[in-house]
Each structure stands twice: as structure tokens, then as C-alpha cells.
Amino acid sequence: MNWSSHIRAIRARAGLTQKGLADRLGTSQAHISRIEAGHVEPRPDLAERIENFRTAPDIRGVLDGIIDTVRRSPDIICVIRPDGDDVRYVALSRGFRNHPQFLTLREGDRVIAEAAREGPDLVTRIRESGIFSGDVECVESAWLAEIRGFRNYWHTHVTPIQTDHDGRYLYCAMRQLDQAAYEALIARWDGQLRIIHYL
């Protein structure tokens, strides 16, 4: 058993910091850190508690539940997160995976900002809006995507999901627009982006 990667995977699934997992297992954050670093293996009693925690249905973190819900949804939604200079898909809904424009996209893929003329600028502006740092409640965008010969207008509503490890993820709900609705949104917002700050 590779305890280092096993503990990381359990923490990621439950959305916990090392301290959060340690508290639930009745051990110290330092001990969890040493296991993750590969310096020690858990004692048999701790190994048993880890496995019981891993298999308990009621320990699913909020993020884990959201990701499962997204994956089953017939709507066009996804969960994304920053990864260095990129933004990557964490979960894709059934509706997203089955849409002709997105058939080739997979979880783990980089969000292809180049699919829209304004895409790279929109992705940069969304990243700089403060949504990943907790300063923004949601961001809405209207964009035209041209992927695989398909041309579609989209309205995306992006809200942050905070976990106690790994920073923020974004829940992205998308709906297809006709050209008139797209142009009306842009006119109403005076641009392609609307940033809503917390009150």
C-alpha cells in the first residue's frame, strides 16, 4: 500500500486539510504529514481507522457530493479549478459530455479558452475577478464558442465552492442562447462579463 498517495486521495475525496483528517482520525496533523511525505506508515489501529473513514458513506465532503451530482446531471454544467497558469475540468455533467460541441473534452483537460474569440481575455478576467480568492460571489459571462465546426452562444453562471483544502473550485452552469439573447445580455452588462461581489 502506498500510504502517501492513499492519504492524499482520501483527503481530496473528503475535502479535508491534514489537520481536518487528523482530527477525524484521532491523531495529529504532524503524523498525517509524515505519512503523506512517506516517512512513516500508520500503526495497524490507525490504518484500520483510515479505512473505516475512507469507506464510510457519511464522510463524503461537500465537494465530493457536488462532483457526483454534476457528473449525473443532464444539464450542461461542470466543475473547474485553477492549475498553475491553466484552469482544468474536474467534473463534467452528462449533458456537457453529450453536447456536440464538447464531445472531445474530458475531466482533467485544460479549459480551452481559445474556443471563443474573446475566450483568453474572459478566462483571464474571471481569474483576476477575485472568484478564486473569495472576494466574488459569482461571475456571469456571455460568449460565442466555435468548436469542431459548431458555433454556439452561451451564458455561463460561475460560483465558487470552498473546500478546507486545495482552495476554491468553480461550479459552472451553462445555457445555450440564440444570438439575440446573447446580444441583449452584452448590452445589459455593457460587456461580456458581470462580476457580483459579496454584499
Image (spheres, rainbow, N blue to C red):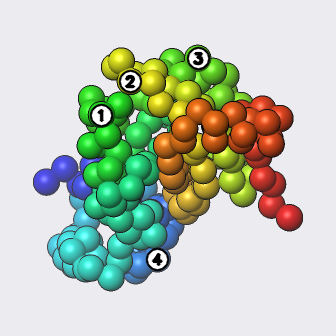
Q: Tag 4's secondary structure? A: helix
Give the residue pinned by disc 3: 117
Residues at circles 4 and 3 in contact by the CB criterion of under 8 Å: no
Q: Tag 2's secondary structure? A: strand
Q: Amino acid at mark 2?
A: Phe
Residue at the front extreme of this rendering = 180
Residue 170 pos. (x, y %): 54, 50
Residues at circles 2 and 1 in contact by the CB criterion of under 8 Å: yes
Disc 4 and disc 1: Cα gap in Å?
46 Å
The disc placed on residue 48 is: none
Circle 4 residues within 10 Å: few <14, some 14–19, many ≥20:
few
Residues at circles 4 and 1 in contact by the CB criterion of under 8 Å: no
Left or right of 66 in this view: 46: left
Residue at the left extreme of this rendering = 1
Disc 2 and disc 3: Cα gap in Å?
14 Å
The disc placed on residue 23 is: 4
Look at the image and tell me in which quarter the C terminus lies.
bottom right
Is residue 173 among what the camera can see?
yes
Q: Tag 3's secondary structure? A: loop
Disc 4 and disc 3: Cα gap in Å?
48 Å
Give the residue pinned by disc 1: 100
- Going from N to C along the chain, the mark reached first, 4 or 1, is 4
Q: Amino acid at mark 1?
A: Pro
Circle 3 residues within 10 Å: few <14, some 14–19, many ≥20:
few
Residue 193 pos. (x, y %): 73, 38
Residue 175 pos. (x, y %): 50, 48
Q: Residue at x 25, y 55 (%)?
A: 6
Give the residue pinned by disc 2: 150
Left or right of 42 in this view: 188: right
Quarter-of-image position of residue 160: bottom right
Question: Of 37 and 121, which appears nearest the observer?
Answer: 121
Residues at circles 1 and 3 in contact by the CB criterion of under 8 Å: no
